[in-house]
Amino acid sequence: MRILLKNQTSAQLHAALAPAGVSPHLARRLLAAAVKRGELPAPGSGLTARLRDDLLALTEIPHLTQVQKVVSPQDGFARYLFQGRGIGQFEAVRIPLLHRPGDLKYVACVSCQVGCAMGCVFCATGRMGFGRNLAAWEIVDQVVKIQADSPHPVRGVVFMGMGEPMLNYDAVMTAIGILSEPCGMAIAAKAITLSTVGIIPGIRRFTAERHRVRLVVSLTSADPLQRRELLPVEQGNPTPDLIQALREYHSVSGQRVTLAWTMISGVNVGEGDAQRLADLTRGLPIKLDLIDVNDPSGRFRPPSRGELDTIQRRSGYRRCLRHAVGRHR
């Protein structure tokens, strides 16, 4: 089986191709050429014509197929639909960051799975069910394809598209390694955000491995019974244990914990909700992203003006509009 470039970090490539005569420096060149140009480097600087021929036989550079692209005339967001090598299609979104004149750039919101097994009741992707995990190269190539289609650089990546990153942990972390390597996409680790619905073993592994990327956890309710109705993940990952894992993360990383709170009218935007959140996180430095629910079925509605004022006043946080791909976080 051929080794797929864009599916391994440069260190992993070196380990796999060292028997063929590939040095660490050449492994970095191979990754850079595959990611930035979609081809092997030309002979020279340690790559002979014979070794290049050997690598052509040993490796392959896979590519996603772009099925569709839709650009919103309101905000300039571009939604892409991709097809990989397995079943199902998946989406990514190009988000323009235009708040700094003369510093135009984008953030890529990427998927890590086809569908999602989490079943969050107000999430469109959750209603699809789980299809499959994406390979690391399928994650990386979403960013590569978006960058190739963009007039300005992609400077950030958010794992807020289809799927739960902690349930495809190894591929996601490999993709993050490639995206942040100087010979890969050279996107700063601090500009990469991993969003999880609260998979405790994954959070603890993430903490132990001391990753530098930003962690966001979807909470949405501080009431375990209510949270279980909205986010079935609560059954196996109870809120008290989740908050303890986040306290451990803060202790190890020194970072504030970012919690995402999907606001649903009449459900979780009252004074009692804000007080329960304050009690639950007491002593834990947090940042709270207040997000309007986006439910195409119409079953769940965003908060009214009065509800928004209440949750903002009592929680002390302002709304953060999150543009994700069919997900609530």
Image (cartoon, rainbow, N blue to C red):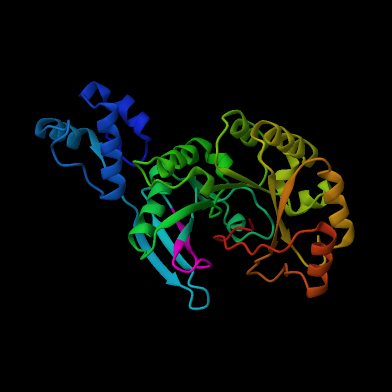
Give the residue drawn at x 14%, y 30%. 51
Q: Is residue 124 left or right of residue 138?
A: right
- With respect to residue 297, does 233 lie above or below? above
The reply to whether the magenta stretch includes residue 70 is no
Q: Nearer the viewer, residue 238 or 87?
A: 238
Q: From this view, report whether residue 5 is shown above or below residue 95.
A: above
**In this picture, residue 193 sits left or right of residue 225:** left
The image shows residue 326 at horizontal and vertical percentages of: 57, 61
The picture quadrant where one finds residue 127 is bottom right
Outermost residue toward the bottom in this view: 73
Residue 93 counted in the magenta span = yes
Instruction: From the viewer's side, name the closer residue of 239 and 144.
Output: 144
Above/below status of 233 relative to 120? above
State which quadrant residue 311 falls in.
Answer: bottom right
Q: Horizontal and vertical percent for residue 122? A: 68, 60
Vertical side of 328 occupied by 139: above or below: above
Which residue is at 44% across, 62% downward?
105
The residue at the point 85 percent across, 60 percent down is 314
Can you tell which quarter of the image residue 12 is in?
top left
x then y, percent, for residue 254: 67, 36
326 or 286: which is nearer to us? 286
Of all residues shown, which one is farthest toward the left?
A: 49
For residue 61, say whether it is visible. no
Q: Whole-percent x and y of residue 57?
A: 18, 35
The quadrant in which the C terminus is found is bottom right
Residue closer to the observer: 10 or 116: 10
Q: How many marks?
A: 0
Q: Which residues are magenta?
A: 88-105
